[in-house]
Amino acid sequence: MHDLHRAATHANLPLLQTPMTKAVTKLLHGRVMTNALKHKPTTRAGVMVTGGGYQGKTETGCEILATFEDTWLELRRHLNPDAVAGARDLHIPVAYVQTPVTAKPKSLCKAILNFYGAPIHPRMDLPELIRQVAASLHDHGTRALLLDDITRLRLHRADDQDTLDLIRAFMSMHVTLVLIGVDIPGSGLLREGRHDPRTGQVIFPSSRQAKVHGLEATQTERRFDLVELDHFRYDTDEQITAWIDHLTGVEAQRRLMNAPSDMLTGGRMPEYLFERTNGVVGLLERLIEDGCQEAIDSSEECLTESLLEGIAITVDGDTARDPGAGEIPVVPASVNSGPAAGPRSAKRKRPRNTVLDDHGPAAENTGT
């Protein structure tokens, strides 16, 4: 039973705040809250969150919007003043929808309606589906609509271009659009947009679907703030310190019998973990989870380089992710590829981290 509790702890490592997530939190929470407080019939500016695969974009976005939802419900005393009869107990300030792999305007509308559990008649045409989406957003008091895996859209397909037009039309439904995807600037989604250096916003032209649902936009352009959730880097003292701080937070969650206090932060372990994961938090989490399970099963009860060398980070079998959209990252190869591999080469790609070294009082006395 004790081992079961330890396995559950290692399988549910907390979402830790990083310098990258702080920037996303500041922009996203501020934008959604500001838009939610608006009463003017203006188009709400949206937010795009980009980054590589397994870097925690979805988890970070959902955590930020969950915090906003709690705040909004407390502010409104869990009541929706605009609720219609029969929907007062279905107040949903935030909606989460995953972009279909083969997206079409109809399939996207149905995905949104499925989130609300709204009835969908098989003979409903696109204008009827859009009107139903607008009604669901309004009736449930939704203030933010998160569309995940947005880079599954391929703009060389006409259906995907129409879907992007429809997404931009959603901005006139008085909700904040939050689009999350892998490498949005390189995906082609921004090819019709232009970057405003004064505001840092990406500005899109008016979409063709703007009047389909009967709600005309009051602006001819739609605006998005683009923010990147980058991976950790290991080049400067500040970047190394941020990586070690993150490892310290992960270290506090380990439940291994023989683990020293600096199991992940002592010696060369921070450099080794960076080499294995390239600073991607999702890959680090996978390596730590599997490593802790192996440490318990083998009775070693400690994470060491030799133990982690036998742990392969496998993400190719994740059927919930689309490799073609860049949702599967490149996993760095293990330093020792097998039992026949010789000792670790003395040549290192980066100098040894000395940020937290204690040189002692003798180092301060230059006369000795």
Image (cartoon, rainbow, N blue to C red):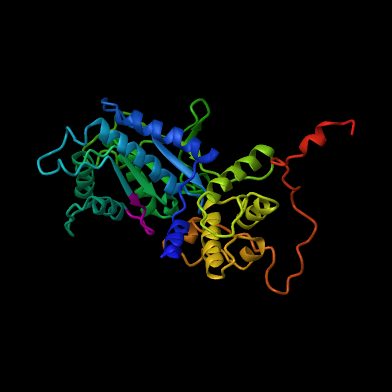
Quarter-wise, where is residue 309 in the image? bottom right
State the image coordinates of residue 63 (x, y, percent, origin top left).
39, 43
150 or 95, which is in the foreground? Answer: 95
State the image coordinates of residue 131 (x, y, percent, origin top left).
20, 44
> In the current view of this chain or complex, which residue is farthest to the right?
367
Residue at (73, 43) in percent of width and height: 354
Instruction: Relative to 201, say whether 98 is above or below.
Output: below
* Residue 7 covered by magenta stretch: no
Residue at (48, 56) in percent of width and height: 325
Q: Is residue 340 left or right of residue 94?
A: right
State the image coordinates of residue 92 (x, y, percent, origin top left).
24, 42
Q: Is residue 222 visible?
A: no
> In the current view of this chain or complex, which residue is farthest to the left?
85
Q: Is residue 131 left or right of residue 57?
A: left
| Count of marks overlaid on the render | 0
Instruction: Relative to 182, say whether 299 is above or below.
Output: below
Majority secondary structure in the magenta region:
loop
208 or 336, which is in the foreground? Answer: 336
Residue at (39, 34) in percent of width and height: 29
* Residue 99 covered by magenta stretch: yes
| Quadrant (top left, top right, bottom left, bottom right) of the N terminus | bottom left
Q: Is residue 107 visible?
A: yes
Q: Is residue 277 left or right of residue 69?
A: right
| Quadrant (top left, top right, bottom left, bottom right) of the C terminus | top right
State the image coordinates of residue 324 (x, y, percent, origin top left).
49, 60
Residue at (58, 48) in percent of width and height: 247
Q: Give, as a single range, the part of the protein colored magenta.
A: 97-104
Quarter-wise, where is residue 4 in the image? bottom left
Q: Is residue 344 left or right of residue 310?
A: right
